Amino acid sequence: MAQQTDESVVLRAGVRGVASARVTRLSTGRRVVEVRINPVQRRGALSAEDSATMATGASMALTKRLPLVLIISSSGVDMEGGIAALHGWGATAKALADCSGVVPIIAVAFGLAVSGPALLLGMADVVIMTGSAVAYVSGPAAVAELTGLQVGPTELGGSGVHSRMSGLAALVAEDLPGALDLVGTVLDYLPDHLDTVAPRVAYNDPWDRRTPELSDLLPPTDTGSYDIRRVISAIADDGELLELRAAWAPQLVTALIRVEGVATGVVANQPQSMAGTLDIAASQKGAGFVSMCDTFNLPIVTLVDTPGFMPGKDLEWRGMIRHGAQLVFAYAEATVPRVCLVVRKAFGGAYIVMDSKGMGNDICLAWPAAQVAVMGAEGAVQILHRRADAPTQASLAQEYRVEYLNPYLAAERGFVDDVIDPVDTRRAVAGALRLLDGKRERLARRKHGNGPL
């Protein structure tokens, strides 16, 4: 993300502090507003003046409709600044909230991000952390005092924790220059603001390219695994994809691709992890990604292969219903072009929430091996014929597979628009997106939905 400094306009240049703000241009040609906190004094502690500089940068991004790039290393609010410094941080948070949903907010954490600055990371659309970055709301000392648990900074809030456990980090880079390069890569897929579309990129990959590599992708058994990213690559121009939050909830893949040069979001169940089942983290991951794509006018392609939601007392107690509904709400609210492809299993409630026709997708496709049903054969027989002996149940399960576990019954009822050969996957998906180009929906007048948070 090397900047051309001769085109930069510095904001509040005469104000001393650790925060700076400027309008600049990336090496890719995109103009952005960059807000940076450097730990040159007191490890980047924020004074009231620093917070005002950050808020000014955010306000400029909103006014000029430019992406906002936050580059943060801060120990939190400056204690010597007192309530004025605390108030300033609140004003910064308000300015970021005003930008949210209007312009892309990309945050880079390259050092310490504690308390308030850590929460600013949580307000970004995409967070990129360096390998040495650490972020937490309450530090090791507070954890030890309250819980008695001795934990180090990296174990508490290192980039590994936030990429695998919390889902905060969408991408991790080796160092700051690498993280800044990733900023440009991410922004290549996003528009400047919500009222425009991402730049269309030149491509040489034919839209109707056949995908014979997918003809033998599915394993011979229903429980066999495969890498869903092979399907995503087959659909994408030149096989390129940028996966976000790859290490968090890996049973659901969220990736950015291009189809005929058009930036597109992909949500896909990953059979290689937990058989593609949905849990709380996967639901949150999918909901956030769908919402971002809808906000910034990216078409959404959903690839379905899931046996359902993960059962468990702990999951239910932690709010599986509420968090699962987040994914429902995100898809139901999305107004961008939406194409769904059922690759294999699509059972029960998980089938519904993975952008089924009932959720409002525009075009639903399926491979011939797709299984669209309330549940799998064994589960259905256990409910319908629980008193039958084992050989009878096995025979009934086979009959159930033949009669119900196929996409044709759903196609007869209009729930699947077309059953396609896997070798025609890119052609079918690209053709559907072509048809939906320019789709518009009239939204009901309301302040906002009141979905589960």
Image: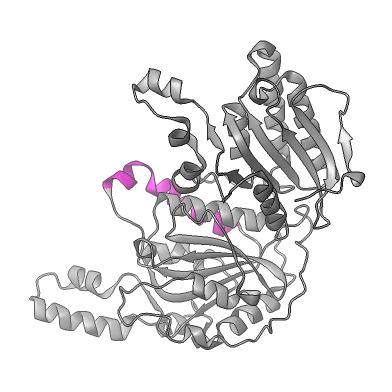
Residue shown at the point (85%, 42%) measured from the top left: 23
Does residue 329 appear in this view? Answer: no
Whether the magenta-drawn stretch holds residue 316 is answered as: yes
Q: Residue at x 90, y 39 (%)?
A: 9
Of the pair 223 and 184, the residue shown nearer to us: 184
**380 or 446, which lies in front?**
380
Report x, y in % for residue 158. 50, 38
318 displayed left or right of 340: left
What secondary structure predominates along the stretch shown in magenta?
A: helix
Looking at the image, how many numbered discs can be counted on the residues? 0
Is residue 56 within the magenta segment?
no
Left or right side of 400 for 199 = right
Query: Percent position (x, y) of residue 388?
Result: 9, 75
> Would residue 108 be found to the left or right of residue 150 on screen?
right
Q: Is residue 24 in view?
A: yes
Query: Which residue lies most toward the right here?
Result: 6
When asked about the image quadrant of residue 18, the answer is top right
The percent coordinates of residue 8 (x first, y second) are 88, 42
In the image, taking residue 286 as reference, residue 7 lies left or right, namely right
Q: Which residues are magenta?
A: 313-333
In the rendered view, tell whether residue 142 sits above or below residue 29: above
Q: Nearer the viewer, residue 5 or 392?
A: 5
On screen, residue 238 above or below 63: below
Outermost residue, left side: 389
Instruction: Place residue 59 in its image quadrant.
Output: top right
